Structures are given as structure tokens and as C-alpha cells.
Amino acid sequence: PKPPVPCISILSRSQAHVRREQMGAALVPLLVSVVLMVVAAARAPAASAAPRAFFVFGDSLVDNGNNNYLLTTARADAPPYGIDFPSHRATGRFSNGLNIPDIISEHLGAEPALPYLSPELRGAKLLVGANFASAGVGILNDTGVQFVNIIRMGDQLRYFGEYQRKLRAFAGEEQAARLVSGALVLVTLGGNDFVNNYYLVPMSMRSRQYALPDYVRFIVSEYRKILALQADTADSCMHAAIEL
């Protein structure tokens, strides 16, 4: 049987007593802890071994440029983004420098996985993996509607299926299956379902529909459906859920 794909899932949760303007500060130390846990899971390969492939799904915390190829307002292609990146240019990462996937790739001993929409993602670059994340998305399809054109989770998983077909065409069935089954998968979702949905405007549709504890339970149930779809897309995926 194929070995499972190690999959780190990050789900941002809110607490009833945390006000909207406090959410960012409250999540920072938790996010740092999660990054350390993910990096620990991404053990560097032996010197003689090829780095593991790396697949990334989620939102702006892990998007490394997919939204640059979309007509959307959720973009990070201008300063001050990228001012501390090695090139000192905005790359589409929602960061002044490296982001979470970059740090994990360094620990894997690999180059960063390219955005799936990048025209450079072809040939041997497919062996590194791919980043399917898109800033603005959430667990729910109605999250981030103000950004107009973003890659929602259903489309990210569809692109993952396309990627696997391209990989098989380039590397062959056996090597492609081995690469996917041995890859590291990072999923980070949930923050936008609060900031860009539940708390987006006073008396938002979701806040009128659900009390906060009920909303949390609802998005957790929807998140589990996404993980199930992802497992179907990748054939085998072991999910280690980290809840914030």
C-alpha cells in the first residue's frame, strides 16, 4: 500500500471574548507555535536523498503569487510587500519577506514550490511540488466575495488534480505516485471566514445566521469536508489538524 501523505492542517478558530480588532494580536503567538510544529514535521532529507515534494493550499498566509495571475483586489505585487525578500521586490507573497512555505522549503532543503498558475511550473519544476493557495479564500465559498476573483478551495483541489496529470505525463506513473505519496502537504484556512465574512460588516449575513459558537462549529464541519475531498484527490493523506 502507498504510504500516507503527511498533511499539516491549520484551522484558525475564534473565541467569543476576542473582539475583531484583537484577533490579529491574539493569533500571532499561536501562529508562531504552529510554524515551529510544521517545520519540525518537515525534517530535512539526508544529504543523498532528494527533497520531498511540497504542496500548499490555503489563503494569504501561504499564497506565494497565484493572485498575481488573477484579476482581483487581493494582491501583494507592490511595495511594501517584499521589501525584505532576497530580491527586495514584491512577489505576490503577503509578507515583507519569506512566508511560511518558504521557511518549510528551506528546512526540506528544497527550492520554494512555484505558484500553480506560474508559467514556469513545468518540466523538472513539477518535481518540487506546487503552491495552490490564493489570498482571500476561506473555508466557506461566500468568504472573500469582495475580492471577486480568487481560487476557492474547490478550484485549488481541482488544480491539484490537474497538477498530478501533468506530473504523470512528465515523470511517469510510478515516480509521480511515489512523489505525491511521500510529499508534505500544508493547509492553512479559517482566518478569512471571520475577518472577511463573519466580521466583515456589522450585522453580516453569517453573524445574523449564527451565534459565534455555532458559526465555529459550522465552519469546522465544512473544513472537514474539504479535508475529505483533498484525501480523495490525493488518494491517501494523513491529516494532523492543528486548531488555533
Image: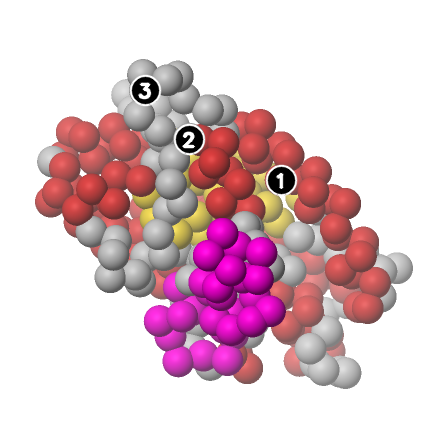
Tag 2: Cα neighbours inside 10 Å, few (<14), some, or many (≥20)? some
Q: Indicate which label's residue lies in the foreground, 1 or 3.
A: 3
Q: CA distance from mark 1 to mark 3?
A: 24 Å
**Residue 120 to residue 9: above or below:** below
Residue under numbered circle 2: 109
Which contiguous range is marked in magenta? 66-94
- Picture coordinates of residue 136, whole percent (x, y): 54, 69
> Residue 35 has which mark?
1
Give the amino acid type for the residue marked by disc 3 in the picture: Ala
**Which of disc 3 and disc 2 is earlier in sequence?**
3
Q: CA distance from mark 2 to mark 3?
A: 10 Å
Dividing the picture into quadrants, the one containing residue 170 is: top left
Which residue lies under the disc numbered 3? 49
Q: Secondary structure at mark 2?
A: loop
Q: Secondary structure at mark 3?
A: loop
The correct choice, above or below, for 157 with respect to 66 in the image is above
Main SS of residues in magenta: loop
Q: Are marks 2 and 3 in contact (CB under 8 Å)?
A: no
Q: Residues within 10 Å of mark 3 (few under 14, many from 20)?
A: few
Q: Earlier in the sequence, mark 1 or mark 3?
A: 1
Going by the numbered disc 2, the residue's amino acid type is: Gly
- Label 1 residue SS: helix
